[in-house]
Image (cartoon, rainbow, N blue to C red):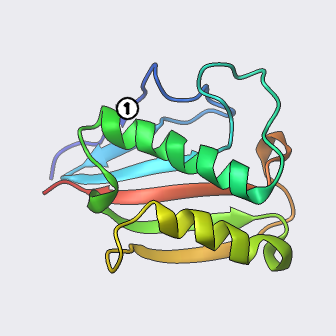
Amino acid sequence: MSLPEFLNFAAAPTHVAPFSHAVEADGWIFITGQMPTDPDDDAKPLADGVEAQTRRVMDNLLIVLTEMGLGLGNVVNCKVYLTEFKRDFPAMNEVYRSYFEPGKLPTRTCIGVTALARDAIVEIDMIARRP
């Protein structure tokens, strides 16, 4: 078993807390939950609505995957966190689903939470695997 590699990427969004963008160990990649922040301007206000925030979160996750030479086809598990679960679950699902090939969805858990950093309404983390 190899030692974990702690990874950070200049193209990815600025950290909102002390963490690495991803950690890789033995071909498994654990990607920190991404917020709907603009990777080019951390001071920019978050987009309104769960659809726009989910798109930004998924795009931020794609930045990390791309920096690692991977794509969404390598993702095996996601965790989604919503502050307004009943209200936002259907709309978040529509956007989330659009990022994956039909029939190739990773396993997933969706959790209702009381709050997220930066007053975001959605956060998503991922586990991926190298071929």
Taking the spot 46% from the left edge, 23% from the top edge, the residue there is 11
Q: Is residue 34 visible?
A: no
Q: How many marks?
A: 1
- In the rendered image, residue 21, in percent from the top left (x then y), is placed at 47, 37
Taking the spot 55% from the left edge, 64% from the top edge, the residue there is 96
Label 1 Cα neighbours within 10 Å, binned few <14 / some 14-19 / many ≥20 = some
Along the horizontal axis of the image, is 78 left or right of 28?
A: right
Q: Quadrant of residue 4?
A: top left
Q: Quadrant of residue 105?
A: bottom left
- In the rendered image, residue 69, in percent from the top left (x then y), is placed at 23, 38
Taking the spot 59% from the left edge, 63% from the top edge, the residue there is 95
Along the horizontal axis of the image, is 2 left or right of 115?
A: left
Label 1 element class: strand
Whether 81 is drawn above or below 22: the answer is below
- In the rendered image, residue 13, in percent from the top left (x then y), is placed at 57, 29
- In the rendered image, residue 48, in percent from the top left (x then y), is placed at 83, 46
Residue on which the image places disc 1: 7
Q: Quadrant of residue 83?
A: bottom right
Taking the spot 25% from the left edge, 49% from the top edge, the residue there is 25
Q: Amino acid at mark 1?
A: Leu
Q: Is residue 8 visible?
A: yes
Whether 120 is drawn above or below 104: the answer is above
Q: Quadrant of the C terminus?
A: bottom left
Residue placed most toward the observer, 60 or 131: 60
